[in-house]
């Protein structure tokens, strides 16, 4: 019901294996997908996925820093050059809107579609459409930063297949008709009422995606009942103590302890400092996370996709390898 594809997992600067931050979120509600953050060259990463910029419903920017936003002008220009017509939502701080407007003007870029800007403040709910609701939550960073919660609700029907078989209806098109609520006439002339053979179901799924943030507990309300938390963990705790509070980032330990206390079943760590982009560095971060968090844990990798299964557990879909830069 929820699929996450990481388009960039590095903090500050890109490395050969990790681009700067961006995440694609897909739902089963349709082809539309959403992007959270758009670091430089995000559109290059998109080329390695099946995702189309024409199906992109909106872009949510957590804060103004370049490793989360410098990919926007190029992405918008490419969408225009390939003939996008449908409006695109840009949920971003006002300075991002002003910067994009200036770039469009000074580079003579005339978008072929409407860019609908939604400012970060003041109301919490950002977007509601169909079964999707997007909310935002204020975080703590040296620039104003927010996290987003994507909540999905999908209504459906479960067929009582045993009862259908008992009434002599074998698997086939008739099952589809009953599922769709259509009464069917059986071979003996009797009518089978669909309502007696299907039960209404409601599936829910939610993911919270944090922006840069030195206080994960600020996401306490956002994470209530959530299935997944995606959060930056720029440093190990030892390195965070060494660099001091100036950068206002989180350590792996800080996020893992919060996720554990919040009872989150799935945790994906991302936005790693380039100093950890080697096997020993990532092993150090993962070991620190596992020391403080016993749930389903993933250290995000570029182009890796993860899907939330019906059992509430997140699973990695494909063993993708990042392309050589
Ligand atoms: Zn960042
Ligand atoms: Zn930042």
Image (cartoon, helix red, strand yellow):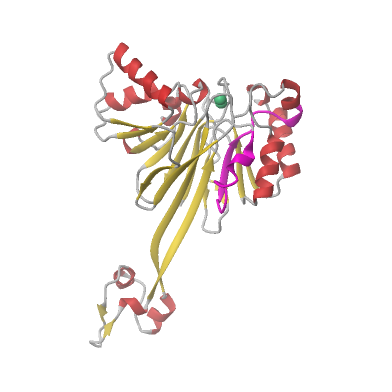
Q: Residue furthest top?
A: 106
Q: In which of the image's four quarters is ligand 1 placed?
A: top right
Q: Residue furthest front?
A: 122
Is-magenta flag for residue 13? no
Residue displayed at 56% across by 30% down: 9
Q: Nearer the viewer, residue 103 or 22?
A: 103
Residue displayed at 39% across by 61% down: 155
Q: Which residues are magenta?
A: 215-238
Where residue 290 sits, quadrant-wise, is top right
Q: Nearer the viewer, residue 149 or 165?
A: 149
Q: Is residue 189 visible?
A: yes
Q: Position of residue 82 (x, y in %)?
A: 27, 27
- Counting labels gives 0
Q: Position of residue 185 (x, y in %)?
A: 24, 81
Residue displayed at 36% across by 84% down: 167
Q: Is residue 306 visible?
A: no
**Is residue 214 depicted above or below 156 in this figure?**
above
In screen coordinates, is 35 left or right of 306? left
Where residue 316 sits, quadrant-wise, is top right
Residue displayed at 41% across by 39% down: 34
Where residue 72 sits, quadrant-wise, is top left
Q: Nearer the viewer, residue 260 or 32?
A: 260
Q: Position of residue 314 (x, y in %)?
A: 56, 49
Q: Position of residue 164 (x, y in %)?
A: 38, 79
Is-magenta flag for residue 231? yes
**Is residue 226 depicted above or below 101 in this figure?**
below
**Is residue 186 depicted above or below 103 in this figure?**
below
């Amino acid at each position: 019901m929820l699929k996450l594809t990481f388009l960039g997992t590095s903090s500050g600067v890109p490395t050969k294996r990790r681009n700067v931050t961006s995440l694609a979120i897909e739902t089963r509600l349709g082809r539309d997908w959403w992007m959270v953050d758009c670091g430089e060259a995000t559109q290059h990463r998109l080329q390695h996925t099946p995702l189309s910029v024409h199906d992109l419903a909106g872009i949510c920017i957590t804060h103004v820093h370049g490793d989360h936003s410098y990919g926007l002008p190029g992405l918008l220009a490419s969408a225009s050059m390939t003939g996008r017509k449908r409006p695109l939502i840009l949920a971003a701080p006002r300075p991002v809107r002003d910067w994009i407007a200036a770039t469009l003007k000074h580079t003579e870029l005339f978008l072929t579609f409407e860019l609908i800007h939604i400012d970060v403040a003041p109301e919490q709910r950002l977007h509601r459409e169909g079964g999707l609701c997007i909310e935002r939550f204020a975080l703590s960073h040296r620039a104003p930063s927010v996290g987003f919660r994507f909540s999905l609700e999908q209504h459906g029907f479960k067929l009582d297949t045993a009862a259908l078989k008992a009434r002599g209806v074998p698997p086939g098109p008739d099952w589809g008709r009953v599922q769709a609520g259509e009464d069917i006439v059986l071979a003996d002339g009797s009518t089978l009422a669909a309502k007696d053979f299907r039960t209404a179901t409601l599936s829910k799924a939610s993911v919270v995606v944090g922006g840069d943030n030195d206080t994960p507990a600020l996401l306490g309300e956002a994470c209530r009942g959530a299935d997944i938390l995606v959060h930056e963990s720029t440093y190990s705790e030892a390195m965070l103590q060494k660099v001091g509070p100036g950068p206002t980032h989180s350590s792996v330990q800080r996020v893992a302890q919060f996720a554990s206390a919040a009872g989150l079943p799935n945790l994906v760590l991302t936005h790693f400092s380039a100093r950890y982009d080697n096997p020993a560095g990532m092993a150090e971060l993962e070991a620190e996370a596992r020391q403080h968090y016993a749930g389903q844990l993933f250290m995000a990798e570029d182009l890796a996709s993860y899907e939330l299964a019906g059992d509430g557990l997140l699973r990695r879909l494909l063993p993708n390898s990042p392309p050589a830069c």
